[in-house]
C-alpha cells in the first residue's frame, strides 16, 4: 500500500501550483527520470514519488517516465507528428 500522507514535510522550489502570476519555470532536473519519479516498492509495483504528486509537471513527467520504461506508448498524435516530420525531412533532402 502507498504511504501518502496529507503532511507537507518536504520543500522543493518547483512544486508550487498556487503561483499563477509568476513567469513560467523550467522543468525540474528529475523530469521524466523513471528512477526518481516512478520508483518501485518492495513488491515491484510502481509508486509515484510523494513529492511528485504536488508538482505542476506531474502529468507530463509521469507520462514521459512511463514511456521511457516502455509501459506507456506515445499518443497517436505524437506518432503521427513524428511521421510527418520524418516524411518532410526526406522530401526536402530529395529536392537538394
Image (spheres, rainbow, N blue to C red):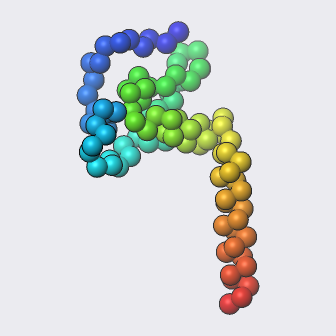
Please state which of residues 61 and 69 is positioned toward the viewer in this rendering.
61
Left or right? Give the position of 7 relative to 1. Answer: left
| Residue 86 can be seen, yes or no | yes
Q: Kindly indicate the quadrant of the structure image that contains residue 46.
A: top right
Query: Residue furthest toward the front?
Result: 21
Kindly identify the residue that appears in the image at 35 percent across and 12 percent down.
Answer: 6
Q: Position of residue 92 (x, y in %)?
A: 68, 81
| Residue 34 can be seen, yes or no | no
Kindly identify the residue that appears in the image at 38 percent across and 11 percent down.
Answer: 5
Kindly identify the residue that appears in the image at 68 percent across and 90 percent down.
Answer: 96
Left or right? Give the position of 95 relative to 18. Answer: right
Please state which of residues 53 and 17 is positioned toward the viewer in this rendering.
17
Q: Is 83 drawn above or below residue 46 in the view shown?
A: below
Q: Kindly indicate the quadrant of the structure image that contains residue 28.
A: top left
Query: Residue furthest toward the bottom?
Result: 96
Q: Position of residue 39 (x, y in %)?
A: 50, 27
Q: How many marks?
A: 0
Please state which of residues 75 and 19 is positioned toward the viewer in this rendering.
19
Q: Is 67 drawn above or below residue 84 in the view shown?
A: above
Q: Position of residue 78 (x, y in %)?
A: 65, 52
Q: Position of residue 48 (x, y in %)?
A: 49, 25
Kindly identify the residue that appears in the image at 66 percent across and 67 percent down.
Answer: 85
Q: Is 78 drawn above or below residue 17 in the view shown?
A: below
Amino acid at each position: 500500500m502507498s504511504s501518502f500522507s496529507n503532511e507537507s514535510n518536504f520543500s522543493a522550489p518547483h512544486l508550487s501550483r498556487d503561483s499563477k502570476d509568476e513567469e513560467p519555470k523550467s522543468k525540474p532536473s528529475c523530469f521524466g527520470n523513471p528512477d526518481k519519479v516512478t520508483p518501485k516498492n518492495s513488491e515491484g509495483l510502481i509508486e509515484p514519488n510523494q513529492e511528485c504528486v504536488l508538482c505542476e509537471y506531474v502529468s507530463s513527467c509521469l507520462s514521459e517516465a512511463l514511456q521511457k520504461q516502455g509501459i506507456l506508448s506515445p499518443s497517436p498524435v505524437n506518432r503521427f507528428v513524428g511521421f510527418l516530420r520524418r516524411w518532410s525531412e526526406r522530401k526536402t533532402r530529395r529536392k537538394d
